[in-house]
Amino acid sequence: MKRWALLVILLYFLALVGLTAPVYLVAFFPQGSAQDALGIFASGLYWIPLAAMIVSQAVLLLVPVELSLQRPSTRRSVVATIVASGLMMGLLGAGAGASVLEFIKQEQALNLAMRGQGAPLLATLVLVWAVWCILFYRTSRDTAPMDLVTKQCRYLLKGSILELLVAVPTHIVARARDYCCAGFLTFLGIAFGVSVMLFSFGPAVFFLFLARWKRLQPQPGQAAD
């Protein structure tokens, strides 16, 4: 079962990398160029959050993998999924906050957001992360591990949709304004929203692979399909 989980993680990675340039070109059309889009991959600031998302996706699949192997889920794996899902909620909070900040402050937004090496955005991320970790932990007390993962994915999907409903309109407004780096922070909001939306589908995709695998495996006394 672990190989199916690795396949899901690989697909998530490929989806994020593959969508990076197209989303950038659409978001900054017509000024955005292919050279600028490809230049994103040369930045360490791109790969660090990407790595965090990939690791979080792997952690979120801990409980589904354990259950597919008919192993009891440990408390450690449940807590790990809480931390990973809370981090994704933190990204949504930071993306929404950045989008609203640019909508209100316009050309001053980038300087405010990046003050102290991005301290305001990091503070928002950590605060939202902590709040959702507490909420998910309280929910885990009376919820079966798989039901908890399902709820987390449902919240992440709804949260990403709400965040995009903030990020996309504010990005359109920002791009219509004539100032330096217009739309950069709102673009981050869009990027986080799309990334977390794809993230929330991980366990569902895993179980699709698992169901297909079970159909292909011959049962005792039966031939494979």
Image (cartoon, helix red, strand yellow):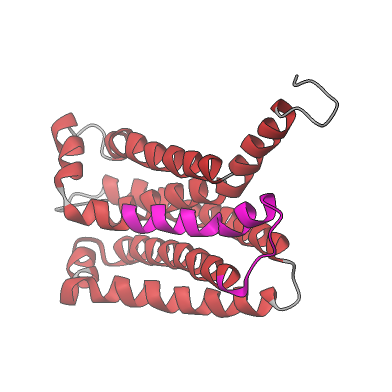
Residue 53 part of the magenta segment: yes
Location of residue 70 with respect to 205 vertically, above or below: below
Q: Which residue is drawn at 68% across and 75% down?
A: 139
| x, y percent for residue 81 | 55, 65
Location of residue 191 with respect to 59 vertically, above or below: above
- Residue 42 located left or right of residue 125: left
Location of residue 166 with respect to 80 vertically, above or below: above
- Residue 129 located left or right of residue 66: left
The residue closer to the viewer here, 81 or 215, is 215
The residue closer to the viewer here, 190 or 66, is 66
| x, y percent for residue 35 | 13, 33
Q: How many marks?
A: 0
The magenta stretch is 50-76
Image quadrant containing the C terminus: top right
- Residue 123 located left or right of residue 113: right
Image quadrant containing the N terminus: top right
Residue 157 part of the magenta segment: no
- Residue 165 located left or right of residue 176: right
Q: Residue at x 19, y 49 (%)?
A: 178
Name of the residue lying farthest toward the front: 221
Location of residue 64 with respect to 25 vertically, above or below: below
Q: Residue at x 63, y 54 (%)?
A: 64
* Prevailing secondary structure of the magenta residues: helix
| x, y percent for residue 32 | 20, 35
| x, y percent for residue 13 | 39, 42
Q: Residue at x 68, y 55 (%)?
A: 67
